[in-house]
Image (tube, helix red, strand yellow):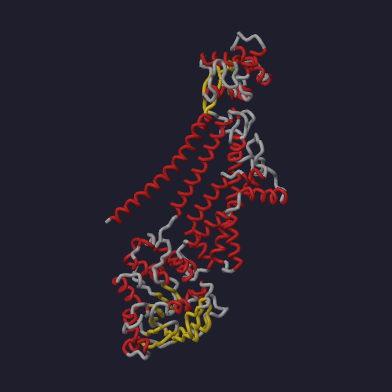
């Protein structure tokens, strides 16, 4: 009797240990997600300042100097400005990018007059004050000094400062100005890299797995290959970066910083993961099905392509997507092949210089500008969204391709 | 009984690596008869069966010495293609193993694979005929496109028999085809075997001596990799020549 109660107690205690472990893990995950979301969510909004424009119909728009005209219109809203210092203080509230927005506005309204208030991008300093990232202390807030604060207060009292959705974040590439920096370049770079990594590694890995599992005769040599592949999966990713640097850049002289090279390097890194997963999946196909096919007179290759691979496909794809998801978050090998550059253009193809999402995160996290902090978190959110999407695809494919027998 | 020799196995030795599985087996299999292989577990019955359609080729460590003559042709000769051999020698396995495809596609697989039919109608005919031969057609004619695995165990086994028949083999090898089935399904398969022997030469491995007695014309008793005794089933069961055979069929060993 005593024995049983002891056993029950032990059982309960182990359950408690298990629950505690799960709870701790979940809370760590929760802290991480909360931290990233609470910092990053504000990057999806951006501060805009309204400027009262008055450009009559008869002015030739192409002769306007956009910067001077915008500055003039903005300063007109503060007639009390006298000194140069004040003027500079007021103008520093607008972003350097505002003039491009003004140019666009001029282009759109060719042959029309432009009147009334229009919204223009505010500087990162003002943005951080409006978002509350920097707190007001007396008449200053962060890098906004007393001179600037006068104008901020004036604009705010007239409701001429507003938070709008941040159209730069997802539609432009990196920039020196935090308010204009976006991750589109990095996303496209990542997509190219991943696509190339998949196209290269998937067929090679699956064929290698098929060969090792179904065709190769088992001997010392195949054992050696097997051991090596398993070890390769544990090699630090930076080593693959060095390999990519040596082979693709120095030997084949492919362009530096290009997603093509990034993709090939990531393919090298993903290869062993997919081979191992594919071999496990192929091994788990019931031999009775293959025997039946062979018994019907199918050849080895017909059996492999007709039955073994289709039945192993859910497992192969799951392994592949895990490998690709790992590759998408990989930074170190990309640093080695130069995808760590500051690139302001969205890459037009896999040969153009580009960064990748994790590298962009690394670059921004490293940046001294405080306004990049929230963008770093926002980029992490996008990266996580990508990974979740990939995992959902994996689950969907597995469910769809799985056949019962 | 035609008494025509179909398969002749001569001095067959089989090794799996260092382990010898068959010792100098000699056996004649007559056309359009049912030959059953009986014996205790691990005596080499299935190994012998798999040699007849070279399924042992799949086992890397398997080495075969001796001759297996099918219509006086050695099947292990280099000029013999295992694919053509397996078209002539069909196989039904211990556990029903339909493909993860529809009932129709299970049966249509062989004819398609070997390009035996030219049109869809011809293929349909082959499928229907094969299913009818295995006595399954009436039961599944309304659900030919459902998965083969949705059938019951006995039906699945008959589907596997239909699949084997679809390429019109001369010989049908059955490796304990009823061991995973209940008595009613077993009875159906046994009736089927009696019918099929009108057209096909059948070799069946079985653990059940009653089954061997019921379905087979000839019986071969194997023990520890050796063929101990072979002869007409009724002789073997009523008047075994060998002591070991006697012990086995009376239940003293096995």
Position of B74 with respect to A71 (left or right) is: left
- Residue toward you, B116 or B21: B21
Residue A237: % across, % down? 61, 49
- Quadrant of the rendered image containing residue A147: top right
- Quadrant of the rendered image containing residue A224: bottom right
**Residue depicted at 53% across the width and 52% down the height:** A320
Q: Which residue lies furthest to the front in this view?
A: A2
Q: In this view, does A89 lie above or below B195?
A: above
User: In the picture, which quadrant includes the C terminus of chain A?
Assistant: bottom left
Residue B39: % across, % down? 38, 81
Could one spot residue A189 in this view of the protein? yes
- Residue toward you, A328 or B92: A328
Residue B127: % across, % down? 40, 67
- Residue toward you, B196 or A205: A205
- Residue toward you, B8 or B143: B8
User: In the picture, which quadrant includes the N terminus of chain A?
Assistant: bottom left
Position of A375 with respect to A20 (left or right) is: right
Q: Which residue lies furthest to the left in this view?
A: A1
Could one spot residue A47 in this view of the protein? no
- Quadrant of the rendered image containing residue A46: top right
Q: In this view, does B105 lie above or below A184?
A: below
**Residue depicted at 48% across the width and 47% down the height:** A393
Residue A44: % across, % down? 52, 30
Q: In this view, does B96 lie above or below A228?
A: below
- State how many labels appear: 0
């Amino acid at each position: 009797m005593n024995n049983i109660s002891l056993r029950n107690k032990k059982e309960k205690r182990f359950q408690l240990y298990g629950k505690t472990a799960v709870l701790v893990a979940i809370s760590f995950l929760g802290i991480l997600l909360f931290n990233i979301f609470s910092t990053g969510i504000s990057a999806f909004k951006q501060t805009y300042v309204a400027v009262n424009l008055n450009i009559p119909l008869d002015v030739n728009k192409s002769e306007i100097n956009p910067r001077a005209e915008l500055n003039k219109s903005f300063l007109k809203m503060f007639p009390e400005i006298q000194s140069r210092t004040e003027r500079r203080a007021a103008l520093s509230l607008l972003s350097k990018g505002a003039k491009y927005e003004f140019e666009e506005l001029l282009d759109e309204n060719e042959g029309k007059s432009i009147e009334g208030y229009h919204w223009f991008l505010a500087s990162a300093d003002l943005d951080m004050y409006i978002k509350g990232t920097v707190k007001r202390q007396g008449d200053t807030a962060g890098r906004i000094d007393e001179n600037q604060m006068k104008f901020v207060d004036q604009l705010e009292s007239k409701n001429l400062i507003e938070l709008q959705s941040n159209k730069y974040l997802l539609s432009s590439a990196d920039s020196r100005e935090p308010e204009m920096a976006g991750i589109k370049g990095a996303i496209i770079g990542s997509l190219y890299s991943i696509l190339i990594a998949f196209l290269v590694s998937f067929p090679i890995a699956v064929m290698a797995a098929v060969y090792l599992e179904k065709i190769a005769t088992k001997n010392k040599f195949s054992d050696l290959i097997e051991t090596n592949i398993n070890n390769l999966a544990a090699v630090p990713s930076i080593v693959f970066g060095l390999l990519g640097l040596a082979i693709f850049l120095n030997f084949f002289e492919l362009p530096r910083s290009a997603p093509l090279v990034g993709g090939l390097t990531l393919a090298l890194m993903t290869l062993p993961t997919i081979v191992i997963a594919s071999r496990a999946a192929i091994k788990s196909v019931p031999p009775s099905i293959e025997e039946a096919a062979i018994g019907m007179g199918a050849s080895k290759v017909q059996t492999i392509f007709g039955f073994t691979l289709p039945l192993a496909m859910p497992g192969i794809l799951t392994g592949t997507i895990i490998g690709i998801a790992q590759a998408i978050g990989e930074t170190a090998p990309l640093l080695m092949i130069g995808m760590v550059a500051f690139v302001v253009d969205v890459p037009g193809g896999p040969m153009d210089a580009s960064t990748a999402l994790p590298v962009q995160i690394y670059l921004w996290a490293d940046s001294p500008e405080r306004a990049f902090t929230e963008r770093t978190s926002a980029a992490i959110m996008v990266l996580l969204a990508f990974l979740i999407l990939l995992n959902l695809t994996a689950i969907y494919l597995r469910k769809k391709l799985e056949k019962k027998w | 009984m035609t008494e025509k020799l179909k398969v002749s196995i001569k001095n067959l030795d089989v090794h799996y690596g260092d382990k010898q599985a068959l010792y100098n087996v000699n056996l004649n299999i007559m056309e359009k008869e049912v030959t059953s292989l009986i014996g205790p577990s691990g005596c080499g019955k299935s190994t012998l069966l798999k040699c007849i359609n070279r399924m042992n080729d799949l086992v890397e460590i398997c080495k075969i010495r001796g001759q297996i003559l099918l219509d006086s042709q050695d099947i292990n000769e280099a000029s013999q293609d295992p694919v053509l051999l397996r078209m002539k020698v069909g196989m039904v396995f211990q556990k029903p193993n339909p493909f993860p495809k529809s009932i129709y596609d299970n049966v249509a697989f062989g004819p398609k694979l070997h390009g035996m039919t030219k049109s869809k109608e011809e293929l349909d005919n082959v499928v229907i005929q094969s299913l009818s031969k295995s006595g399954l057609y009436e039961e599944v004619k309304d659900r030919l496109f459902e998965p083969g695995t949705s059938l019951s165990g006995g039906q699945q086994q008959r589907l596997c028999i239909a699949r084997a028949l679809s390429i019109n083999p001369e010989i049908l090898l059955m490796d304990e085809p009823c061991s995973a089935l209940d008595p009613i399904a077993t009875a159906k398969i046994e009736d089927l075997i009696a019918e099929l022997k009108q057209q096909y030469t059948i070799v069946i491995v079985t653990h059940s001596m009653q089954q061997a007695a019921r379905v087979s014309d000839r019986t071969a008793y194997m023990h520890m990799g050796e063929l101990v005794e072979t002869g007409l089933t009724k002789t073997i069961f009523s008047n075994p020549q060998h002591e070991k055979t006697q012990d086995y069929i009376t239940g003293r060993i096995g």
